[in-house]
Amino acid sequence: MLGRAVESHADMPTVHPESEIWVPKSLEEIELVRRELDSILETDRFKNSRRFPQLFRYLVEETLAGRGETLKERSIGIAVFGSAADYDTAENPIVRVTVAEIRKRIAQYYQEEGQNSRIQIDLRPGHYMPRFYRERETAKADGEIAAQEGHSPLEAQAPLVLAPSGVVEPVRLGRHRWSFRFLALCALLLAGLALAALGYEYWSWSHSSALSEFWNPLLADRRTVVICMPMGNNNGGQTAEAAGILEPESGTPAAQSDAQPSKPNANPHTSSFQTHEIMGEAIIFSDTVAVLRISNYLATHRRDSYLRLAPATTLEDLRSGPVVLIGGIDNPWTLHALAPLPYRFSGTRQESYWISDRNHPGKKDWGLDIKQQFSAVKRDYAIIARIYDESTGQIEVIVAGIGMSGTAMGGQFVVDAQQMELLRHRIGPAFRDHNFEVILSTDVVNGSTGSPRIEAVSVW
């Protein structure tokens, strides 16, 4: 079997014999493990690979979060490599092969540049949960040394004075000794309470579901959730131009580049009933799939949701309760909400769109030309955000792709427990109650999306 064959790569000892198994518990200890992980991943054995660092970091972070015992080959393949939920691990041994190669490279690291590492990470053959090691502490406490010499710790540290007989004796502290002990006990008690509070905070953060934490700020409001989605026949270029996100191309008259941002038009129904019946409420399938996934999640948590089409949505509607905005370029309310945020949509009148970064306005890496052939699109991007919108006074979740593939991928991302765990590890404790905006990318083949990848995160 291929799985057994690759295990032979890990015959070399990984950790030093003077180290002992160690379970990091405090935030400081967890940070030490992450620093050691970063040191390993910065070496040539890992940094020139994309697959090895991604899997190794996932295994370590899951173990630090207390889920190491639940690491299984199938769940790892789904979470890290985007494999289908029912994939055959016998026919596709990518997890076993990659873990075996990581194990070999860890052993090489600790035999060479990592020989003096005080914190060490080990992957045992046949296991996916890393073990952590640190150097044994051989120094004894001053109190233990004093006890072995037949003195109390305070007597051992007492200053020496010359008695009338000329014999040097330690000063007897008497009542002061008990006062000192009392103060020391109080200090230790306060320190213990502080550590317990920090430990509980970390425990509650690491043991609650990341998916629940993502939605909790919105679900905490008992009112009906408003889900706003675009109409499929809406002209995305006109919406983008009305929102003022289009940039002039060379040769474009300057007058055309002066479009000012505007709020969405709430009164679009000026056509005949027949025209409206045929075309007025057409919707895009990928937007509908995203809505269904989110509304089903809300329903499982006993939250009602109300679906509205963007052109018929008013500002008062969005002020009536928590909001979920679906769609990007063709949803004017999404463009309005994203306008003040770090990441937002930009584009040209040639219908080329990208996600712009306020800190790097010239960057156009996250882009898509929606005029190219359907089969030629290889990658799409999306913005995922959870924010407090001051204009509505409500918590909003935004799921907006440049193209329909991006929106579909975003709709799956916000209800996927494993993807949310990865995002929580990326953001940290601020994930629970801060505003944040995320850029996702996905490979596209004939309109079908692959696994999402987190490109950038902004938290405030």
Image (spheres, rainbow, N blue to C red):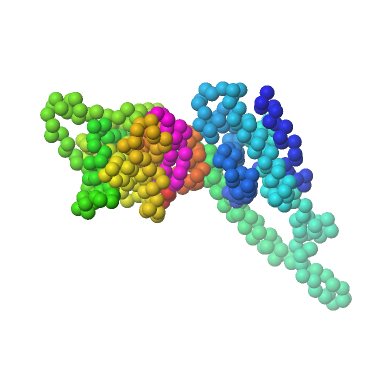
Residue at screen point 22% across, 37% down: 311
Q: What's drawn in magenta, residue-wise?
A: 437-457
Residue at screen point 57% across, 38% down: 51
Q: Nearer the viewer, residue 401 or 214?
A: 401
State left or right for residue 57 relative to residue 261: right
| Residue 50 image position (x, y, % from top left) | 56, 41
Residue at screen point 53% across, 33% down: 81
> Height in image: 347 above or below 209?
below
Residue reaching furthest to the front: 251
| Residue 126 image position (x, y, % from top left) | 68, 30
State left or right for residue 125 relative to residue 236: right
Query: Could you say which quadrant of the image residue 121 lies in?
Result: top right
> Height in image: 433 above or below 173?
above
Query: Number of labelled discs?
Result: 0
Query: Could you say which quadrant of the image residue 283 lies in?
Result: top left
| Residue 362 image position (x, y, % from top left) | 38, 53
Q: Is residue 214 visible?
A: no
| Residue 218 image position (x, y, % from top left) | 37, 39
User: Considering the image in quadrants, where does the N terminus appear?
Assistant: top right
Residue at screen point 59% across, 23% down: 91
Q: Main secondary structure of the magenta part?
A: strand
Q: Nearer the viewer, residue 218 or 274?
A: 274
> Height in image: 76 above or below 241?
above
Query: Could you say which quadrant of the image residue 370 lies in?
Result: top left
State left or right for residue 169 relative to residue 48: right
